[in-house]
Image (cartoon, rainbow, N blue to C red):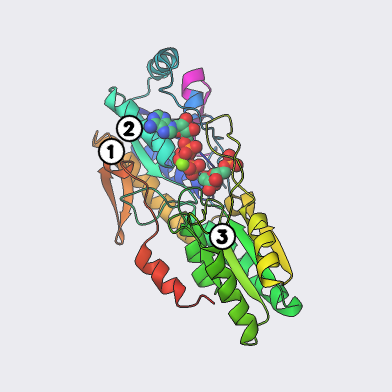
Amino acid sequence: MKTIGVLTGGGDCPGLNAAIRAVVKQAIIYDWEVIGIRNGWKGLIEGDVEPLTHYSVSGILSKGGTILGTSRVNPTKNIEDLQRLRDNIKKYGISGIIACGGEGTLSAALALYRRGIPVVGIPKTIDNDVSCTSKTIGFDTAVTIATDAIDRLHTTAESHHRVIIIEVMGRHVGWIAMAAGIAGGANEILIPEVPFDIEEICENLKQRYDHGKAYSTVVVAEGAIPKEGTGFRMPEQEIDEYGHVKLGGIGYLLKDEIEKRVGVDVRVTILGHIQRGGSPTPFDRILATRMGITAVKLLKDEDYGKMVALRGSKILPVKLEDAVAKLKTVDLDLFDLAKTFFG
Ligand SMILES: Nc1ncnc2c1ncn2[C@@H]1O[C@H](COP(=O)(O)OP(=O)(O)OP(=O)(O)O)[C@@H](O)[C@H]1O
Ligand SMILES: O=P(O)(O)OC[C@H]1O[C@](O)(CO)[C@@H](O)[C@@H]1O
Ligand SMILES: [Mg+2]
């Protein structure tokens, strides 16, 4: 009999509960015990844990968020926390840890693995920016929500002959913007990987009006940046308690520029955390279920330091160090395809 621990770290996303449920169900088949670690690595440092049984995971498959809670705490920040974490692993008899997280939480998992802690990772983040896996848990749901929003904003933009800017999440990468932009037929898509030229965008929008298309939808990732020397100034940005730049608001900067340069009525919708809430899509439920089960199997094989990944149609292990070596940025061939529909 083994005892394993499971935690969720970083921003929450739909599908985490489906993964936790799968971990618990598979562990029960092996006759193992599962300890739920509350609020990411913080719970392991503080010894904030709860046993997870059949009953604790009953009815959570379709529920958004994470029943375990989450945080962005770095367990390797100081030696004292690291020691407390080790003491708690010993205290609760944990022989393997499953960490569900984005590149930050998984980098911490790798750092712990390198210090001898038996850990495997499950990639989750609406941003879809973890390498070595074609999809992360939560991305499909976020794209579905953003596409629905674009569809709805499209009809009102058309009725009022307006430009509507839809700002979506995507701190370092533009996967949500690109996927939802293509699916929703956006007239412009702005992503962090390809700095934008405000003059070019305004020219395209003007041309649409000249050609009788008296409305437009513009999708912008929150982390989009202007091309240098193109006359678009970004304000100073605030930093949050975990050292992340506080994003959100590029849509309003674009609005001012477009109104000034094109002379049309512009409205802005910032989708924000709506993209991270609510029920996961069937795709995310299935992905999370498969990943959760495979992660437990890796612990059974004592195949630590790995992350489960979607490779083609299979869920396979990859090295954590490869998964976090660099962010998975947008496929620029796909972005080129999206450009066919700009203007
Ligand atoms: N190289 C690293 N080593 C140890 N800890 C790290 C490392 N990089 C990031 N972290 C910790 O992981 C936390 C979570 O990272 P982050 O906030 O990026 O979330 P995430 O897990 O990537 O999920 P998401 O990006 O979807 O919100 C960070 O706040 C930081 O404390
Ligand atoms: O929950 P917070 O701290 O506002 O985090 C927002 C960030 O989290 C993410 O949603 C990733 O989970 C980013 O796209 C976004 O920038
Ligand atoms: Mg991250």
What's the distance in space between the residues labelled 2 and 3, CA to CA? Answer: 32 Å
- Compared to residue 2, the image places residue 64 above or below, namely below
Amino acid at the residue labelled 2? Leu
Disc nearest the viewer among 1 and 3:
3
On screen, residue 156 versus residue 112, left or right, reads right
Q: Are marks 1 and 2 in contact (CB under 8 Å)?
A: yes
Mark 2 residue's CB less than 8 Å from ligand 1: yes
Mark sitting earlier along the chain (1/3): 3
- Compared to residue 10, the image places residue 167 above or below, namely below
Mark sitting earlier along the chain (1/2): 2
* Tag 2 secondary structure: helix
The image quadrant that residue 245 belongs to is: top right
* Residue toward you, 320 or 253: 253
| Callout 1 crowding tier (Cα within 10 Å): few <14, some 14–19, many ≥20 | some
Mark sitting earlier along the chain (2/3): 2
Mark 3 residue's CB less than 8 Å from ligand 2: no
Q: Residue 81 at x, y = what percent? A: 45, 16
Residue lying at 54% horizontally and 35% vertically, measured from the top left: 70
Q: Tell me which segment is drawn in magenta.
A: 44-55
Assign the N terminus to one quadrant of the image. Answer: top left
* Tag 1 secondary structure: helix
Residue with the most extreme bottom position:
212
**Disc on res. 220:** 3
**Disc on res. 321:** 1
Reply yes or no: does residue 47 show up in magenta: yes
What's the distance in space between the residues labelled 1 and 2, CA to CA? Answer: 7 Å
Mark 1 residue's CB less than 8 Å from ligand 1: no
| Callout 3 crowding tier (Cα within 10 Å): few <14, some 14–19, many ≥20 | many
Amino acid at the residue labelled 1? Glu
Q: Quadrant of ligand 2?
A: top right
Residue lying at 48% horizontally and 65% vertically, measured from the top left: 179
On screen, residue 329 versus residue 155, left or right, reads left
